Image (cartoon, rainbow, N blue to C red):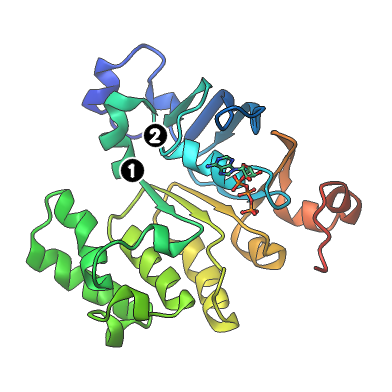
């Protein structure tokens, strides 16, 4: 069991280490002047789990993930990340734990070059520029981007931007990794390589939203399907992908 942080000691009695991983209780979220897109969602993602978040286009996967990382505020409900209640006063500490990959890398890369993007987070958390630069260059080389580290972001391909965004996330050594459609724009070699490296990362919880069902099968053991505001299916990924009737009923035909 990990050590209790000062935030946990100072927080209410419910913010205890037994809420490690991700815990969501009765989360409701709606966009302004709309019916809730997420309705009383409760879930527990335990340390050690690798989970797929599936669902038809527009069901709210990105919205749920953005709630989990504090980018959107639920109408009601509670979220704990690694035992820390997700609320304004804890946001800096919680965000330190989480790596979040946006569906659109352009939403993430905001510095003139990808090298600056990758060193931004570590420097923000106190790593020296020299150390951050050395680590960033290694990470970018690992992602096949050594030749473009100083090129303006807008000159990179879609796949290169996605890999650079992933390098920027991993530079912070997150304990929770949440990725929104991480294979979009990647060629088969990189899709396979990601399938190999993601499960080996030293993260406690890996949560991936994807429409790439066969890829998800290689990376996750548990799959949740979001449908009409609720988690309708929560079962082993392999079992779900062998059950065409459940997949069809969730609007997720395997062959397309
Ligand atoms: N800023 C916003 N304001 C109003 N509605 C929004 C906003 N962002 C998303 N939505 C709506 O919320 C719903 C859920 O969107 P979301 O992007 O979370 O779905 P998704 O499951 O991630 O979809 P996809 O599989 O296409 O990525 C959609 O109907 C979308 O149009």
Q: Badge 2: how crowded within 10 Å, few (<14), some, or many (20+)?
A: many
Earlier-in-chain disc, 1 versus 2:
2
Residue at which label 1 appears: 97
Q: Is residue 100 left or right of residue 5?
A: right
Q: Secondary structure at mark 2?
A: loop
**In the picture shown, does residue 101 fall above or below 147?**
above
Q: Quadrant of the C terminus?
A: bottom right
> Which label is found at residue 212?
none
- Cα distance between the residues tagged 1 and 2: 8 Å
Residue 246 visible in image: yes
Tell whether circle 2 marks a residue whose Cβ is less than 8 angstroms from ligand 1.
Answer: no
Q: Measuring 27% from the left and 24% from the top, which residue is drawn there?
A: 89
Of all residues shown, which one is farthest toward the right? 245
Q: Quadrant of ligand 1?
A: top right
In this view, the residue farthest toward the top is 13
| Residue at 47 percent of width and 37 percent of height | 68
Q: Is residue 4 visible?
A: no
The reply to whether dot 1 and dot 2 touch (C-beta < 8 Å) is yes
Q: Is residue 60 left or right of residue 106?
A: right
Judge whether 14 appears above or below 165 on screen.
above
Q: State the residue position of label 2.
A: 82
Horizontally, is 11 left or right of 63 in the view?
A: left
In the rendered view of the protein, which quadrant contains the N terminus?
A: top left
Q: Residue 24 location in percent, x, y? A: 54, 28
């Amino acid at each position: 069991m990990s050590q209790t942080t000062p935030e946990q000691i100072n927080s209410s009695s419910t913010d205890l280490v037994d809420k490690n991983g991700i815990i969501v209780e009765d989360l409701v979220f709606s966009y302004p002047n709309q019916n809730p897109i997420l309705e009383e969602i409760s879930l527990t993602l335990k340390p050690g789990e690798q989970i797929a978040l599936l669902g038809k286009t527009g069901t709210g996967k990105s919205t749920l993930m953005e709630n989990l990382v504090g980018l959107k505020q639920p109408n009601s409900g509670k979220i704990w990340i690694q035992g820390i209640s997700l609320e304004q006063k804890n946001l800096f500490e919680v965000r330190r734990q989480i790596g979040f990959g946006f569906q659109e890398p352009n939403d993430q890369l905001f510095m003139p070059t990808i090298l600056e993007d990758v060193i931004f987070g570590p420097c923000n958390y106190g790593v020296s520029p020299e150390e951050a630069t050395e680590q960033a260059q290694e990470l970018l080389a690992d992602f096949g981007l050594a030749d473009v580290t100083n090129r303006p972001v807008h000159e990179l391909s879609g796949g290169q931007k996605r890999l650079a965004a992933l390098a920027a996330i991993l530079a912070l050594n997150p304990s929770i990794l949440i990725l929104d459609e991480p294979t979009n724009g990647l060629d088969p070699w990189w899709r396979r390589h990601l399938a190999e490296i993601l499960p080996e990362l030293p993260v406690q919880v890996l949560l991936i939203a994807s429409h790439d069902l066969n890829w998800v099968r290689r990376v996750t053991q548990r799959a949740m399907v979001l449908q009409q505001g609720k988690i309708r299916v929560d079962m082993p990924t392999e079992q779900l992908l062998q059950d065409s009737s459940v997949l069809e009923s969730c609007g997720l035909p395997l062959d397309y």
